[in-house]
Image (cartoon, rainbow, N blue to C red):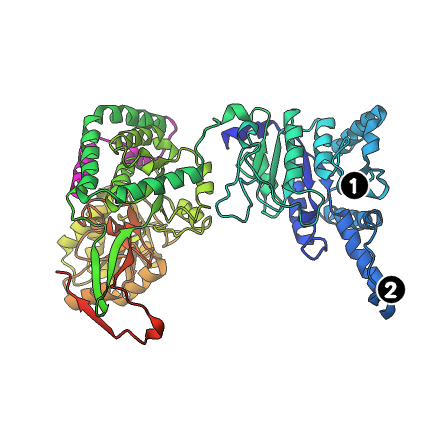
Amino acid sequence: MDPTRAFVKNVRRVVIKVGTAVVTRDDGRLAVGRVGAIFEQLEGLNAQGFEIILVTSGAVGAGRQRLKYRRLVNSSFADLQKPQVELDGKACAAVGQNGLMALYDNLLSQLDITSSQILVTDNDFKSRDFRVQLSQTVNSLLALRSIPIFNENDAISTRRAPYADSSGIFWDNDSLAGLLALELKADLLVLLSDVDGLYSGPPSDPRSKLINTYIKEKHEGAITFGDKSRVGRGGMNAKVKAALNTACSGTPVIIASGFTADNITKVLNGERVGTLFHQDAHSWLPLTDVGSREMAVAARECSRKLQGLSSEDRAKILFDIAASLEANEGLIMVENDLDVAAAESAGYDRSLISRLALTPWKISGLAKSIRTLAEMDEPVGQVLKRTELAEGLVLEKTSCPLGVLLVVFESRPDALAQIASLAIRSGNGLLLKGGKEAMRSNTILHKVITSSIPDTVGAKLIGLVTSREEISDLLKLDDVIDLVIPRGSNRLVSEIKNSTKIPVLGHADGICHIYVDKSANMDMAKRIVLDAKIDYPAACNAMETLLVHHDLSTNGELQKLVDELQLEGVTLYGGPKASSLLEIEEAPSFHHEYSSRACTVEIVSDVGAAIAHIHKNGSAHTDCIVADDSEVAEVFLHNVDSAAVFHNASTRFCDGARFGLGAEVGISTSRIHARGPVGVEGLLTTRWILRGSGQVVDGDKGVIYTHKDISLE
């Protein structure tokens, strides 16, 4: 739950306002599907004991649509040639209210909910007796689990300009909703709109940022509102005014989209949805807090300064970071020990704690890998190809940084140092979000690393994201962030892929296979299989499925492999064939990553069947064949479509450091851009540099193209 929205735990009575833009379609007709989806949420909340009060707009729009149709049906051809008089708004309201409530009552009845209609005017609230009676009536309805539905009675309103006047006790349904929230002592007011909330600029502008919490001292006067709603009376300006008045009087308000599924439910679960208005908001967030966009923009600006340094100066930053990690080993270990102790107290899985724990040799290894990166040939600005297009016109294809990277990782704080060093070596800006279980470790590592970045570049080159809720904001910044790299569970990777337009590089699963052919040297096979499973079971390159040739199940060799694995404490699950033969529990699925001392065993007829099994059930990470028959091995190597394919070698070799990349930002199973362990080269792209001497195209009349390759030596 978002800490700024923890108050929802005590919410019971909620006023929900749906605007005209929510309850109608672009053509003016009622949006039956959208209204139905909202009512399904209300039904669920009603069943949970929430007291729901609904304020609805839409009567005027719905009535206008019906009256226009009736006028068209009843008009002669001659009538249609005359200028059409605008329909009276009060008549539209009278007709539309009837149809609106008929629809509402029908939909709610289908959900076994009783609704009630209450129409009010501005003048009604001038009477103290009316207010007392209103509260009593609503309390009675709520006690009976009925949902009162309010609307301004536009048909008999006495305000002279009901569509422009913003004076009086209330002036539109937003302000009516706010008034009712206070009168009826609601715990929360939710204003549903056609946008996600309040933005720092026009919502259509990619530079605009969703404001999660409105702070009057910070945002008032700094936001320009767009035009009024496409169909209603007001727009965001009216909503903000109503929200501020209500929040300052003590009832929190959230402006959110009525178009997004389950938004009301999410609000009441405390999730960060829309824009929150709260009288204590100024005390929750610092007025100078750095927003997601600001952090990303700062990382880009610093990365450009980094690219302007010489290769030697960029390498020096890495040498300084390595030295600083070693010098601060004690401080790092203190913070990491606190993280590990907290994880153990919370009952985290052993494999997670193993990934979380830092040791002096891990820190030493990090420093060594960072120095290896620093000593590598300069990766940025390398000429990859040089071509003479025409005489005196030379084109170069060069390597350059991607720009700004967002890396989301879980558990392993040592990944922070690896990723940061790779970003610096490749000239990229970086935003990092680690798991909450490693918060202290990540914070101290970030501090140690950024303190080694010179002021000529700026410590904001590497930003540390501390809140999970900020990730949703960052994933919308496709104009500032160039690549997202998730390192973690299948769920994490899938959520990120489904939540952003930014390219995502990574892998969701590490379902690695070893196929032991009938021609395999079995002593070699035993060493490889055991290493791939037990060297580091939690690693994504650990073996999860063992495939064996059928002949090995009849000559006793499979049983020997199984015995060795079980002797090392590995729990075995079988496919249909292996489970029957070996009398082990059948695996619930072949597509399963254990990340522990467990694996699946299955028997296949030959190398072709092994390849088919891998393609059907694997994750395209790393797969291996153990075989002495070179022809069989080549069939496997050339036909298995995975990021890494091995012959007679443990899958655990699929690692950036072991591949000589210095470090890795992650392993990619994507087929675009980078694949397998991603080091510095995977964080670079290319650009073209053309050097000429005054040439012009002029319809290609004066250019004789040669397209000659020029040696790079």
Left/right placement of residue 656 relative to residue 82 reads left
- Name the residue at 29% across, 25% down: 337
- Quarter assignment of residue 444: top left
| x, y percent for residue 360 | 19, 30
| x, y percent for residue 613 | 32, 61
Q: Which residue is mark 1?
A: 162
Q: Mark 2 vs mark 1: which is more N-terminal?
A: 2
Q: Is residue 662 visible?
A: yes
- Vertical comparison of 534 with 639: above or below: above
Magenta stretch secondary structure, dominant: helix
In this view, the residue in front, 85 or 154, is 85
SS under mark 1: loop
Q: Which residue is mark 2?
A: 74
How many angstroms separate mark 2 from mark 1 (CA)? Answer: 29 Å
First to last magenta residue range: 345-372
Mark 2 nearby-residue class (10 Å; few <14, some 14–19, many ≥20): few
In this view, the residue in front, 105 or 154, is 154
- Quarter assignment of residue 156: top right
Looking at the figure, which quarter contains the C terminus?
bottom left
SS under mark 2: helix
Front of the two marks 2 and 1: 1
Left/right placement of residue 169 relative to residue 499 reads right
Q: Are discs 2 and 1 less than 8 Å apart at CB?
A: no
| Residue 43: assigned label | none
Left/right placement of residue 322 relative to residue 302 reads left
Tell whether position 355 is magenta: yes
| x, y percent for residue 477 | 44, 46
